Structures are given as C-alpha cells and as structure tokens.
Image: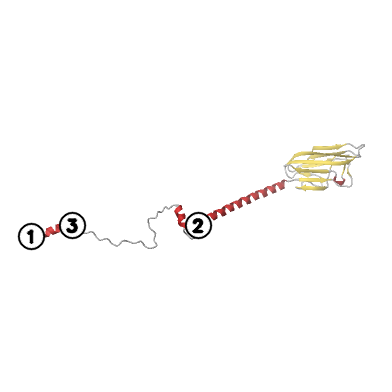
Amino acid sequence: MKLLVVFLLVGTMMVLSEGFPEPEPGPEAKPTEGSEPETESADEDKNSVVKRAAGCPFDWIGFRNDTERKIGAMKEQLAALANRQNNSEKWIEDLERKVIFSAATDGSGAVGPFNTDTILVYQTVMTNIGDAYNQTTGVFTTSVSGTYYFTFFYHAGREHPATLRLYKNEQLVARSHDHKGGDDGADNGGNAVILQLQKGDRVFVRLLAHTHIWAKNHITTFSGFLIR
C-alpha cells in the first residue's frame, strides 16, 4: 500500500514540473476584401491627396487652373469696366462745365446813337454751349463758377464817336473808344479781359449814350468762354 502512494506522489510531481501544454494557435484573421488598412495616417498632406486625385478620371488640377484663369479674366474685365465708367463720368463732368459763346449784332446799318447808355444786344448767335448767353437781352449769366475770357470788337462810321464798355454785374471792367471820325472813313476797336466769376454773375456790353456801332454783316461781336 505504501508503495502505491509513493508511486502516485512521484507521478503527480512529474506532471507539475513539466507544466501545462500551450494551446495551439487558432486560424489568423484575414482582411475583408475592399476594406482599407487601418494603418493610413489621418493627417495625410495635400500633396498625397492631389496625387491620389490625379489618378481619378476627372482632372481636378486642370479644372482648378482653368477656373483660376477665368477668374483672372473676369477681374480684368471688371477693372476695364470701372475705368470706362470713370472716363464717362469725367467726360460728362467736363461737358457740364464747358461754357462757350460767340454772338454778333445784326441789322441793316448802325445801332445808335441813343440818349442813354444801352446794353448792346448781339442777336445772331454762332455758338452758345452751356446756354449762358441770352440773345434777347444781350446778357451772359454765369452758369458755372470759374475763370472766363471775354472779348468784344466793333466797327463804326465816322459820323459819331464809338464807345463800348464791358461790365461784370454793374462794375466796369473794360472799355473801347474812338472819337468822331475826320478824314478816315470808319473806325474799329475792341478789348479783352479775363474775369473770375461766380455762378449767377452777369457780363454784358453797354453802348455809351450818344455813340454808335455798325451792326450789319456781323462785324461787331461779343464772345467768351470758361478757361477753368
């Protein structure tokens, strides 16, 4: 009996000393078809993205370049339109500021002499850009403030003296005069002046009392224009 016990103890100790056998490895998991590997980096740079996109049937790079060209062309067209609009506005502004007139007396012969100073009316208008000159009253009324140039000329016979005076409102600014003729058959004269005017100022020519001018053939004139 003792021998049997000893034999069982020895067998048990041998089993414990050898250890338990390791389990056999199971079948390896195979990746599913169509699934992407989980090892791809989440922060992939743009260059690799472009490289992958280049492999697609749609040309993303060409599409981007073509879009950029079209946007550049549109910007150039908008700039050209803006420049054209600025030029048009400047042209309209210059046109609104353009003031030019030229007129001449008209009649069958002499105008005057009168007993009082009389505003000389130049009935025939050659130019009146800006409509500042009134051919009924003979008065130029400033429509645009600025610097103006005015000039007037006359022709007269020798029977009477000839005296013309240019006024700004009621201020005498220029005159031209010739005495009654003697041996000469006719007289001619004139003057010119540059004036700084404000909108609403009036400029006109007066024929002095007891003097005259020759009105026929547009030989006596009154002109002016805006310098700036």
In the rendered structure, the answer to whether residue 78 lies left or right of residue 60 reads right
> Hey, what amino acid is under mark 3?
Glu
Residue pushed farthest right? Answer: 183
Closer to the chain start, of discs 1 and 2, is 1
In percent of width and height, residue 137 lies at 81, 46
| Label 2: how many Cα within 10 Å (few below 14, some 14–19, many 20+) | some
Question: Which element carries disc 1, helix, strand or loop?
Answer: helix
- Give the vertical position of 92 relative to 171 (above or below): below
Which quadrant of the figure has residue 27?
Answer: bottom left
Question: What residue does disc 1 label?
Answer: 3
Closer to the chain start, of discs 2 and 3, is 3
Question: What residue does disc 3 label?
Answer: 18
> Hey, what amino acid is under mark 2?
Trp
In percent of width and height, residue 187 lies at 88, 39
Please state the total of marks drawn on the protein image.
3
Which residue is nearer to you in this view: 80 or 211? 80
In percent of width and height, residue 76 lies at 60, 51
Picture quarter with the C terminus: top right
In the rendered structure, the answer to whether residue 41 lies left or right of residue 151 reads left
Question: What residue does disc 2 label?
Answer: 60
Which quadrant of the figure has residue 158?
Answer: top right
Measure the C-alpha gap from mark 3 to mark 1: 23 Å
